[in-house]
Amino acid sequence: MASTISPLLTLPLFNCTSFNRHFVMQCGHFRLRKLFMKNSRKCPTNSWIFSTPAWRRGLCIVASATTKQYGDVMEVSAKESEPPCYAWPDNNKRPRVCILGGGFGGLYTALRLESLTWPDDKKPQVVIIDQSERFIFKPLLYELLSGEVDEWEIAPRFSDLLANTAVQFFQDKVKSLHPRYHIEKNGHAVSGSAGVVHLESGLLLEYDWLVIALGAEAKLDVVPGSMEYAYPFSTLEDACSVNEKLTALERKYFGKESSIHITVVGCGYSGVELAATIAERLQARGCVQAINVGKTILPNAPPGNRESASKVLSSRNVQLLLGYFVRCIRRNGDIETSHELSNVEADHDDPERFVLELEPAERGLKSQTVEADLVLWTIGSKPLLPQLETVDQLLDLSLNSRGQAETDETLRVKGHPRIFALGDSSALRDRSGKLLPDTAQVAFQQADFAAWNLWAAINDRPLLPFRFQNLGEMMTLGRYDAAVTPSFIEGLTLDGPIGHTARKVAYLIRLPTDEHRFKVGISWLTKSAVESAAFVQNTLTKMLSGS
């Protein structure tokens, strides 16, 4: 059974026999000065001793950074004790794999490791660390706005997904990494530990192999006002916030003549999918605008997807402002002079609305301003890897300008044979030298290769070079509309209800576990049956009333 470790720092055991360290207090918190010394000593147990029968019954120790009493367990502050070490169940008997991040790269690597066949003494102990308690199937976040899916279907808890595995899950945030340099000899490291992960809760984890799949977050600090007033759309929390805001706006404007003004910044896949979904939801009650610096939407998409999206946006009266970039975002109530908004066609009297000042990106266009009740920002992302603290320059990963780790073709970080990097945390180039896109499809395929290469490295087998296979591109365009362009049939694009069904089936197959796929499949079939019955009933009612 998988165990979940809360932010309070739940520890199965405090004794750690293999971590050599020396800590000093600096600036009010512990900093790792010297990780490894010749002589070994044990982490302190602080008199917290549990008998073996109690441990087998699943009892654990809970501690945090402040001294409080929770039941029969006393919490110890950082000033009273050194940071605790996590005791792996089999300690050094089996390889210890630590996976940072529970997205497509991290979770699917762990599940693939579980499915491989291992010698009894080499099957690794695996730990996943993620800030959220849920895995997020991000391509289906848009369906939360349209009401097609329930939260549990696209955001299951890690504890449920890992219940039938030996993978452990820690809900925590990575504070810093401390890899230890190895001297390789015949494919083996001389030392027994490859490094240490330091978590925000204070817990320290030694590892033999590390997988960095921390993902990325929305980049909002782009123009003045975007951080304060724009909504991102990349996490479950973002989707819930946008859905709540839309619901509040629908109530606010219910029965009024004025429309709800929504502005989407960016016309890549995320921006177009948002614009199409929200325009369908609001219908005549809303006015959706999409801003893009380029002269076309979806510049990197297959022509079939671009054409399908253009038709849908046009049919739903989505206004495209192409060739513009946002100079700043301000709240309407903060503007003193009304003549600044002379070009705005919306209601100037609502102080809760936002004003976006647009500048032309090409000649022949004039500056303009638009108003919006809700601003959605879909441009840019930044990897989370550079946010990790470094201590005495112990973290010496080769990062590119975006903050991604440079990896070789086997997905190992250059200079660190015991560290793999996937997804948004990885800067991997294809054969032509072009960086692979930061998409779920890439991370999904990398997870399979990373798991296999971990198996190969642990079992002294040759590692495989990663080769990305583009299977095609899919996008949602509303409740019963989508566009799917498979790569293996040139010129084919499935759109409308057929594309919608194909996309849902493809993503159903990609869900993490068989059990979750079965539950979601039954749920979707039930919803489809109910909607079909309601449609038939309404059709018959109209026919009978007409006769």
Image: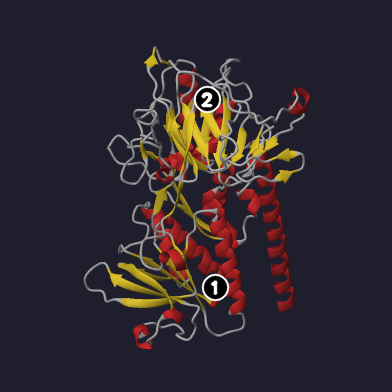
Which x, y percent locates residue 186?
A: 39, 12
Instruction: Provide the residue designation for mark 1.
Output: 283
For marks 1 and 2, give the CA distance.
Answer: 61 Å
Report the amino acid beneath label 1: Gln
Q: Are marks 1 and 2 in contact (CB under 8 Å)?
A: no
Q: Quadrant of the C terminus?
A: bottom right
The percent coordinates of residue 328 (x first, y second) are: 36, 70
Up the image or down, 88 lies above or below 299; here it is: above
**Picture quadrant of residue 70:** top right
Q: Is residue 257 above or below residue 401?
A: below
Closer to the chain start, of discs 1 and 2, is 2
The answer to which of 170 and 175 lies nearer the viewer is 175
* Residue 209 percent coordinates (x, y): 48, 26
Q: Is residue 75 left or right of residue 208?
A: right
Quarter of the image holding residue 239?
bottom right
Q: Residue at left 41%, top 18%?
A: 462
Q: Position of residue 443 (x, y in %)?
A: 46, 40
Q: Nearer the viewer, residue 5 or 79?
A: 79
Which residue is depicted at the point 57% across and 42% down?
201
- When the figure is inspected, residue 355 is found, relative to residue 230, above or below; the finding is below
Q: Amino acid at mark 2?
A: Phe
- Above/below status of 8 relative to 343: above
Q: Which residue is denoted by mark 2 in the rendering?
A: 19
